């Protein structure tokens, strides 16, 4: 999977590990967010592409 933006390439190699190994990789947010807030953030990021 590659994502090109401003002449830069980010490569994310596939990983063969259980999805449960992802738990704890990112810090917990200061406050919980709603599904609507997550969808709005995703839509905003998509518009910037």
Image: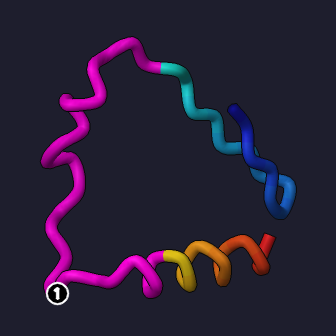
In which quarter of the view is residue 10 placed? Answer: top right
Q: Look at 72% across and 71% down and name the residue there.
A: 46
Q: Position of residue 31 (x, y in %)?
A: 16, 87
- Residue 16 located left or right of residue 8: left
- Residue 30 located left or right of residue 38: left
Q: Nearer the viewer, residue 18 or 25?
A: 18
For label 1, the residue is 31
- Residue 43 located left or right of residue 17: right
Q: Is residue 30 above or below residue 16?
A: below
Q: Look at 21% across and 47% down and name the residue there.
A: 25
Q: Nearer the viewer, residue 14 or 19?
A: 19
Placement of the N terminus among the 4 image quadrants? top right
Bin the neighbour count of mark 1 within 10 Å (Cα to Cα): few under 14, some 14-19, many 20 and up: few
Q: Position of residue 12 (x, y in %)?
A: 57, 33
Q: Secondary structure at mark 1?
A: loop
Q: Look at 55% across and 24% down and name the residue there.
A: 13
Q: Which residues are magenta?
A: 15-38
Q: Is residue 11 magenta?
A: no
Q: Is residue 17 above or below residue 48?
A: above
Q: In terms of secondary structure, what is the magenta stretch mainly?
A: loop
Q: Position of residue 43 (x, y in %)?
A: 66, 78
- Residue 15 located left or right of residue 47: left
């Amino acid at each position: 999977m590659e994502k090109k933006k401003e002449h830069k390439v980010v490569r994310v190699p596939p990983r063969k590990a259980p999805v449960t190994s992802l738990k704890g990789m990112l810090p917990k947010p200061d406050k919980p967010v709603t599904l609507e807030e997550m969808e709005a953030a995703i839509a905003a990021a998509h518009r910037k592409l």
